[in-house]
Image: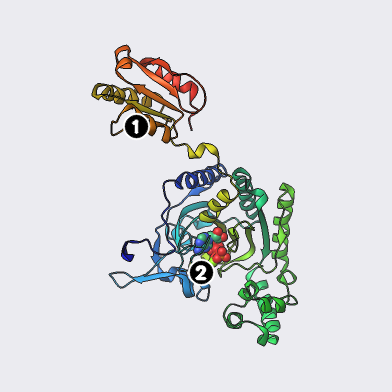
Amino acid sequence: MSKSLQAIRGMNDILPEQTPLWRYFEGTVARLLDNYGYKQIRMPIVEFTELFKRSIGEVTDIVEKEMYTFEDRNGDSLTLRPEGTAACVRAVLEHGITGGGQVQKLWYIGPMFRHERPQKGRYRQFHQIGLEVFNLDGPDIDAELIIMTWRLWGELGIRDAVKLELNSLGTSESRGRYREALVEYLSAHHDKLDEDSQRRLKTNPLRVLDTKNAETQAVLVDAPKMAEYLDEESRAHFEGLKSRLDAVGIPYVLNTKLVRGLDYYSKTVFEWVTDKLGAQGTVCAGGRYDGLVEQMGGKPTTGVGFAMGIERLVLMLETLEQIPEEISRQVDVYLCAFGEEAELAGLALAERVRDQLPNLRLQVNAGAGSFKSQFKKADKSGALYALILGDDEMAQQVVGFKPLRGQGEQQSIAWDALAAHLATCVVQG
Ligand code: ATP
Ligand code: MG
């Protein structure tokens, strides 16, 4: 195929054989979020470039080198959203729904775009489910976010394969004091730092903690620790979070190097990581951003949120073989009809059954065909039962009911009794 007719590198089609697992995952998360009282919000996938520069930070990897930015026909600079928080904050401010201290517990789902090097678990269009809470400033809500994800891992059967890493970046005052101490220490070891870290030391020194370079990591062993610079408020908040996680029995490890790639975090930051996906090990990440709304022009409004990467979590379900059997079956019953008269009767019968059993997944054969070919299609569809309408059945106003998986003889069921019979033998999703 010529190049222009291929998908863009790092942007994937999600094929019909994959969508059941995606829908299972998304449905599970959506139900959980409903149950905890979160409401969905939907934002555009394109925003003014300025929004991301202001919120994410000019010297972050995302803004410096990963954004899909273009000029539209009016000459405005627009960007495909690389993450959801900025747009969510923009939306709540624009509609005034966090004004006067109103609490908002919001979630969103959709594609995000970053020009990164595509590899397993890292794509240029990827999908997130994210969540943001406004105007709740205590550690109790930070804990709720983590407890909720812990429950999700349990429901998905992947809890044993993920680990929670926690850190506190403190208030902006304590972070400021820490930054000074860190810069002083790192400046004294300037020559041993890798090039990226030397640059970051000037622009965004906390990001040096995040380095993958072994020599720089060695320098960091004796660097000042954020934990020692937390002020009383940050310390109490962090203790409050930890005691709640302890109360619920959620294990965590403290990682003083966890700083996250976005500029806006304060106090709590966390990541759920796994060793099952190779290098792309973070499946869910987030934290508190108490200064962001004000920085974006709103009244002081606290915030906390996270985002999880759907591709990585779907990969986890596949890798750990945690795919519920029932999601791969998409047809319960397959109706085969032979001859024109049977086909018409079959259509009417199928509609009556659908009236009575709205959740039944009933597929009617299309494209006619011989007994053999229709039966083959019924079997291939994965259906549990085939319904058969031929000359004999038409004459007696019955339908042949044949189990396709496992034992059981074919029976004849009267048309009027069909829906009631199906209700007893098909568990409807
Ligand atoms: P990473 O360290 O893996 O680059 P990040 O810190 O840039 O992740 P966030 O911006 O916090 O990621 O996004 C939250 C989640 O979205 C990540 O934990 C990950 O699961 C997912 N994610 C981020 N970037 C990508 C990507 N390019 N492809 C697939 N998933 C991604
Ligand atoms: Mg990244």
Q: Nearer the viewer, mark 2 or mark 1?
A: 1
- State the image coordinates of residue 299 (x, y, percent, origin top left): 51, 64
- State the image coordinates of residue 382 (x, y, percent, origin top left): 45, 34
> Residue at image x 45%, y 68%?
115
Relative vertical location of residue 201 with respect to residue 68 in this rendering, above or below:
below
Callout 1, which amino acid? Ser
Residue 302 seen by the camera: no
Determine the quadrant in which ligand 2 lies.
Answer: bottom right
- State the image coordinates of residue 204 (x, y, percent, origin top left): 58, 77
The numbered mark, 2 or 1, whose residue comes first in the sequence reads: 2
Relative vertical location of residue 267 with respect to residue 32 in this rendering, above or below:
below
Q: Nearer the viewer, residue 14 or 428?
A: 14
> Residue at image x 59%, y 58%?
277
Relative vertical location of residue 160 with respect to residue 379 in this rendering, above or below:
below
What residue is disc 1 on? 373
What residue is disc 2 on? 56
Q: Is mark 2 within 8 Å of ligand 1?
A: no
Callout 2, which amino acid? Ile
Query: Toward which corner of the image does residue 189 lie, by quadrant?
Result: bottom right
In the picture provided, is 173 more to the left or to the right than 7? Answer: right
